Amino acid sequence: MTARSRSPHAALLLLLVAPAVGCQSSNAAFSDRLLGIGWMPDAGLVHDAAVSGDKDATMPPTMAPEQGATCSSVVSSDELPARSVVSAGQAGPDQTQVFTRDLFNLFRSHCGACHVDSNRGGLQVSLSSFPQAVTQTALSHILSDDPKYYMPPSGPDAKAFSERAPGDPVVELASLLEQWLNAGSPPDRFVLVNTNTNSAASPYLLDKKVGAALTNLGSCIPDKHSVGTDKDAAKKLDAFFKNATELPDHLADTDIVSLDSELLARRGVIAFAPAYTLWADNAKKMRAVRVPVGEAISFDKAKQRFTIPPNTRFYKTFVKRIIDDDGKARYRKIETRLIVSRPDLPSYNLAPHPRTATKSLFGTYVWNDAETDAVLLRDPLRNGKPWRDHLLTLITDAPGAKKITDTNPPNVQDALDKAGVIRTYALPGSERCWQCHQGSDNASFVLGFTPLQLHRRPMGEGGVIEPAERDELNQLQRLIDYGVIKGMISPKDVVLLEDSEGTRKPRNDHELQAQGYMLGNCVHCHND
C-alpha cells in the first residue's frame, strides 16, 4: 500500500463549526444496525481547535500503473483501512450486542406518538420503565391481525401484521422485541446470535490487499481505458433510476456493488474528494459519482458552474475510526448516503416551500455490524413519512469494551459509557437534508461537487487547511480524462478562490482560510 497519511485538521474557527447533515431513510434489521432516537450525542462533537499539517512536505513523484494493470495504488492524504472482519473475507461476528436503550428508541420511533408521548390504550413508556412496561402482551398486540391493534393505528401503513413482508420495520421491531423478552427483558443490553447465512457471500467483504488499501479515493486509481467498460450492467441501473420514485431497500441494488474501485470503475463509479470539506463530527468519507452512460457533467466556464445530467448518482460513505479487535486503528462503515440528482423545477426560487420543487431522490443506507449489508433507513416521522433523526450506538474500542463486558458489571452500558469505549453517532433526518441541500448552487440538490471544490490544491494555498497528496491534486484532470466532465480543458479553467470576487482580494491568509471554511460549511444555507 502506497497511500500516505497526514494528521486530520481540526476546526479552524470554532464559531463556524457546522453539524454533519445528510439524508436517510430503512428496513434494516435492528440487530444489525443498532439504531436509537432520543439520546444526546457525546462530547465528541467538540474537537481540537489546533490546525495541523506539514506545509513544507514535498509531493511524491508521479507513478505509472504497473504493466497491464487497470488500477494503480492510491497516493492520498487519508488512509481508511477496513476492519479485519471485513478485509479477511469473514462472515462477520457470531453475536451482536444490542443496548436496551437503542431498542427503546426504536420502539419510540414506531410507537412513541401513542405510547411514549401519550397514554393511548393505557400504555405509556419511558426509558426507565421500558423493561417493566413492555411485556409479551404488548408484543402480541403488535403481532395481531385485529384492526384494534394495527401499528401504526391509521394511515396507509396501518395493516394486519400477517400482511407485512420480511424486512418491514414493524416486523423487525417485533422480532427484536421477542428476542429481548426471551432474554428476560434486561434493562441494559442483550446479545443476539446472528443467523444471517448470506453474509459470507456479501459483495462488501474484501481481501486483505483491497481492505488495507482503502482511502478517501477508494482502493485504487483506475486507468481511463477501464472506466465504463461494463456498459450492460450500468445501463440497467440507469433505466431503473430514471423511472424510480423511491430508492431500493439495499445498497447492493445501487451502483455501489463493491468497495473495490477497479470493479466500480468498470461500471462508471468514480471517487472524488472536495477541497473544502464539511466538518462532520470528525467522520471520514468516501465519495463517488456515477453519471448515466453516454452523459457527462457540463462545465460553464463563464458561470463557473456545472450542469449535472438528470439521474446522476452521488454516494457518500461515512466511516469512523475505531480500535479493532486486534488493537489496531481501522475504520468502520456507518452509513452510505445517496442522492439521485434531478434538476429542480423552474419554480425552485419562487416556491413558498422550496422542497415542493425538488425532484431528486435521496436517502441513507445503514451498515450492519459485520459491514456485509447496508439497508435503507425508513423509520417514520409523526406523519408516517420517512424519516426522523436517529442515533446509533457505536463501539469505538473493541478490546476495551470486551474487558469491561467480561467483568459483568451491574449495568454494562453505563460502564462502557464511563470508560469512553462507546459513543453515539447521529443519523440526521429528512428535515435536515432539506435544510442544507435545497441550497445547492445549481439547483441539483447536490453539495460539494463544484469546479472550485474539485480543483484540489496543496495545503496552504487558496485557503486550504487540509493536506492533499498526488491523487487528490490530480482528481479534476482525471474526471476530465474519464469523460465524467466535459467542457473543461484542464483545471486551469477554474477560477481560484482568491480570485472569485473579481478585483476584491483577501486581505491575508487568515481571511482566505475563513472563506474556504465557510465555502465548505456555510454557503449551502447562507445564499440566495
Image: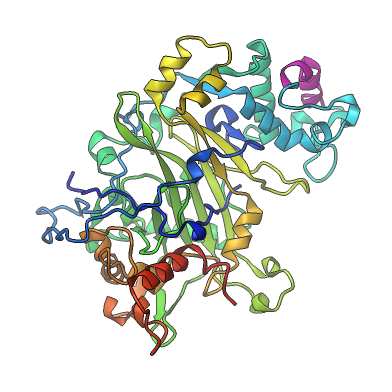
Question: Which of these two is toward me, 469 or 33?
Answer: 469
Q: Overall secondary structure of the magenta stretch?
A: helix
In which image quadrant can residue 348 be found? Answer: bottom right
Which image quadrant: the N terminus? top left
In the image, taking residue 261 as reference, residue 109 lies left or right, namely right
- The answer, for residue 196, to whether it is visible in the render is no
| Colour pattern | rainbow
**Residue 17 vertical position relative to residue 304 in the rendered view, above or below:** above
Rendering coords of residue 448 (x, y %): 45, 65
Rendering coords of residue 92 (x, y %): 41, 25
- The answer, for residue 423, to whether it is visible in the render is yes
In the image, taking residue 395 as reference, residue 151 lies left or right, namely right
In which image quadrant can residue 362 be found? Answer: bottom right
In the image, taking residue 84 as reference, residue 469 lies left or right, namely left
Question: Which of these two is toward me, 88 or 517?
Answer: 517
Tell me the residue at 77%/35% (across/down): 112
**Residue 118 vertical position relative to residue 357 in the rendered view, above or below:** above
Rendering coords of residue 284 (x, y %): 39, 48
Which image quadrant: the C terminus? bottom right
Question: Which of these two is toward me, 107 or 460?
Answer: 460
Rendering coords of residue 208 (x, y %): 25, 34
Look at the image and give the residue range highlighted in magenta: 130-144
